[in-house]
Image (cartoon, rainbow, N blue to C red):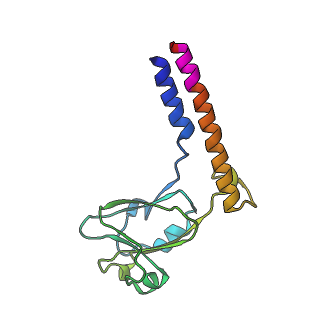
Amino acid sequence: MSWLLVVAVLAGFALGPSAGTDHIVGANHGWNPNINYSLWSGNQTFYVGDLISFRYQKGTHNVFEVNETGYDNCTMAGVAGNWTSGKDFIPLPEARRYYFICGNGFCLQGMKVAITVHPLPHNATSKGSSTRGGTGAQEEAAAAALGARSAAWLATLAVAAVSAIC
């Protein structure tokens, strides 16, 4: 029975992709009026798979993802999503520019942030080490190969575990 536990724990480590960074908007200031979110976002590096989190007083503020026009004019132009929980974790699944505003009239008081999400560095072992030159297709192929190797490794472990039990 203990072998099954070991296999389950190892499976969780082998299959679970490394979690992206959770970028908390405004850091300890949260999502509030009269904060320079351009300065905050300029000090962050966002990658595909990261999260952007908004912390605010539920019922007073909210978060809308809009297009660039909506961002520039503090309107609902191009609304792509909205969140109202007060502790919103928004995944960043693709490399592109994202625009977020508060839709309760506070956008004009500075509650808006634009971020650029970068593709994962090619052959990166961590976000701090990378080499240039990979394409999205190459990165997807590498991820698929890693998944296949992980699955094969897990299957080998499972067979070994069952053999040890029987």
Tell me: 3 left or right of 79.
right
Task: Give the prevailing secondary structure in the magenta stretch.
Answer: helix
Q: Does residue 163 belong to the magenta stretch?
A: yes
- Residue 36 placement (x, y as % from top left): 45, 73
Residue that extends furthest to the top in the rendered view of this protein: 166
Quadrant assignment, res 122: bottom right
Q: Give the number of marks.
A: 0
Residue 95 to residue 99: above or below? above
* x, y percent for residue 96: 57, 70
Residue at 43% across / 65% down in the picture?
Answer: 26
> In this picture, which residue range is highlighted in magenta?
158-164
For the residue pair 23 and 125, the one nearer the viewer reads as: 125
Which quarter of the figure is the N terminus placed in?
top left
Q: Position of residue 38 (x, y in %)?
A: 50, 74
Q: Position of residue 138 (x, y in %)?
A: 70, 57
Quarter where residue 149 is shown: top right
Is 80 rendered above or below residue 150?
below
Q: Of 94 and 73, which appears nearest the observer?
A: 94
Which residue is located at x 43 percent, y 80 percent?
A: 78
- Residue 69 appears in the figure: yes
Is residue 148 shown above or below 20?
above
Which residue does the image show at 62% across and 32% down from the upper left? 153
Would you say 146 lies left or right of 102 here?
A: right
Q: Does residue 58 show up magenta in the picture?
A: no
Residue 129 visible to an observer of this rendering: no
Identity of the residue furthest to the left in this view? 59
